[in-house]
Amino acid sequence: LLSDCCEFWRSAMGVRGLQGFVARVCPDACQTVDLREMAEKHRIDHPDCPPVIVVDAMSCVRRWYTPESWVCGGQWREYLAILEDFINAFMAAGIKLVFYFDGVVEEKKRDEWIKRRMKNTEEIARLFRFIKTHRKQPGREMFVLPSALPTFTRYALKSLGQKTVCTLQEADFEVAAYGLQHNCIGILGQDSDYLIYNTCPYFSIENLSLDRLVTVMYSREVLCRVLGISLTHLPLFACLLGNDVVPESMLEGFWHKCLTTSPHRNSSYNRRTNILLSVANYISKMPCSYSSLKHLEEILPLGSDKTLLCRGVSSYLLPGQQSPWVPPNETNCQMLSLQQQSALCQDKEIFQVTFTTIACINMSTDAAHLIKSSFSLFEMSGRSHNGGSCVGQQLGTEMYFPWKPLIYCISALLICTVHRKYDILVELVLITNYPVNDCSFDLLSSQVCRYWNSAKLVNLVQPVVQLLLVKESVSAAGWHNPSSAASTTHAGNAEQRNISACSPYGTGPGEFVSATPWKYSLCSALAKEQHIQSENYLIFNILSHGEIECSNSLEDDYDTEIPGQALIYRPARQHVYSILLKSGKVLSFLGGTCPVVKEWFVYFGNSLKQPDLIQPVQPSVTGGTPNLKTLWLAKGPDVEKQRYSTFLACFHLQDEMEELQALEAPVAGFCCLVAYLMMQVSSLSLEDLNAFLALILCLKGKSAAQLTGLQLAQVDSRAVHLGAVLIRGLTTLLMANSACGFPFRMDDLMPWAVFDGKLFQEKYQKAHRGCSMEELLEGNVSNY
């Protein structure tokens, strides 16, 4: 879902027209390079640092999916083999790959995401009209990625031993920052934003020759020379052309002014090309200073937000970088804001921790001792601290930390309750050797916390500290006087583990939320870690945002007998939401209420003008739904049984546990999905059921090569639709499996274990032609 939400639209991001401009107008900026030679040079120059390429996976999936069949639901074993060949080609050259996937759709891109969804809906409707008319798959010009391809690509790469990262923000920033910080030989992708970031070289996936490891490297320096600007100008150049921060609609007047005054207009170029040249000419004459940017902000129709340009330029600045267009203090604040959301260095990551009020720290495996002996969370004496940079507004309160510099912090949030609405005031603590400066409340800013209404704060924060318990790593923390804590330091080289609690609403620590109860959970820390490591599915998004997305699927909107997959699986998702959000402690804290989840799902009749607000529904589990601490952290056979039964309850199959446990895990998972479908979709027939079962039984033992060689005389549109429904069902299994503490191995629920598009088409068509069970099962009835 979350990573597929980008599957049709990521290529449209970045600076519109810039990639084509470079190819047409700046051919010298497109330099053919041999990646083997670059890797060898890197080894010579950096003998202690192996050559690494960081891969923007979302811009590569279209290139990776090369199986001939794509409408039937995906040729997953063939695709897995293709990914393995891709990896092996780089491994043979001694090049390590690190794959990044988008983990969120940022709110600033929601409108663009919706526009792409509407366009994709039209494209899919045309695709189904073609299939119904010609009963075959159309040519590549109508190509649409198989449903959920990016999601399963992430797990495929992980199963092949690759490092995969699921981001906490838009992937391009984290990719660019990783490439710079880790001295990578380059970024592999197809996103013009990599021409703007001042990072390592940018390689084209579209122009990659895998057998020779030769591709095109886009040169920022040559681009700047052609445009008559410097590298420093590139972030402003991108903003003035329109990007993810500054919408193009605000720039038309500015473009007209540039076009009318530019000496570089060329009638042989299209308008967009002339705009790029004219904007570059305009800014080349401006002094590189913040005052110049402020002047631009005054002349542009930016509405009430005159900081758009400054924020846009700052969004391209990677950790450690500054820009003359942005004041140093704002640059520092921007960097801290971006870094705290980033998964670049997980052992130093600042986890945001929120409920109605929550403190957040970065802990080591001996964190309990560290908390007890190294700092005081609160001093309850009420005295003032004269001469210090921290003075409590109603209570003298100071925090002490053993850590120096940079990004170890603890945040504290203050609450006032007015008519049951929660207003949040945040002050974040940063221990550094730098002077304290005042930034906006959502950024790391000072060495102190100031609290209002301290009695409420203590009552709210103390349980959270006690909840910071992670199995084998953290035990209960206490409250101590700073005088006894300040002299104690923590020694030890234990492997670090990040611990946090997160709210189900809001995308960042500074987002204002009202009338919304916030959930706290120790297990959110584990969910976040698993999210980054591509080990769970959607759980952190639900806990941290309370909002999830799902892009288009290959569904026939005119087949009214089969509901959209979004609606078919909604009851199962509601049970998952309940497991995650209706923890007993949480409900007690919230007075028995439970927050709704925002769903942005594409289905027929949904205009996407606003999200669907979905209420969690408790599954029917004997003895009640176990809490997350039990499902995720406890051990023992009784707990394993609880995990399995809770998972089955999400699909209304809790009474079938004994029968399903007797099956092999992939078959059991698939049968769970099929049984749920048969209950939810009344139009499914016995022939459909036979096709489903013949698929899973006959798939076992078939190689990728055998499945590739399978030929179809025709393609049935209803089977295409059902194939997409099945694949989306697998993602629902993944979500439930993650929520319930992994009663199944994730590998057992992957499509290459249980599904093949062409094989399903064959079984479906045979079943509906009335073929015997012996023929459906390829003569092996006795074996089943």
Image (cartoon, grey):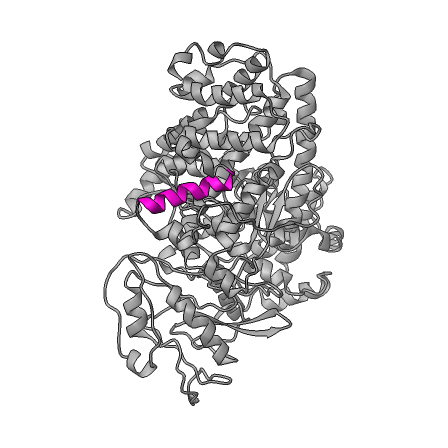
On-image quarter of the C terminus? top left
Of the pair 300 and 116, the residue shown nearer to us: 116
Q: Do we see residue 168 in this rendering? A: no
What is the x, y in percent for residue 93? 33, 34
What is the x, y in percent for residue 597? 58, 52
Residue 224 vs 317, above or below: the answer is above
What is the x, y in percent for residue 318? 47, 57
Q: Is residue 608 left or right of residue 204?
A: right
Inspect the magenta stretch and tell me whether residue 648 lies in it.
yes
The residue depicted at 50 percent of the width and 48 percent of the height is: 171
Find the magenta span and give its range.
637-652
Of the pair 464 and 195, the residue shown nearer to us: 464
Q: Do we see residue 332 in this rendering? A: yes
Residue 366 vs 267, above or below: the answer is below
Residue 45 vs 490, above or below: the answer is above
On-image quarter of the N terminus? top right
The residue depicted at 65 percent of the width and 41 percent of the height is: 116
Determine the image quadrant of residue 34: top left
Of the pair 288 and 675, the residue shown nearer to us: 675
Looking at this rendering, what residue extends furthest in the left direction? 492
Determine the image quadrant of residue 684: top right
Of the pair 24 and 516, the residue shown nearer to us: 516
Inspect the magenta stretch and tell me whether residue 718 lies in it.
no
Q: Is residue 668 left or right of residue 582?
A: left
The residue depicted at 50 percent of the width and 19 percent of the height is: 759
What is the x, y in percent for residue 363? 34, 63
Is the magenta region chiefly helix, strand or loop?
helix
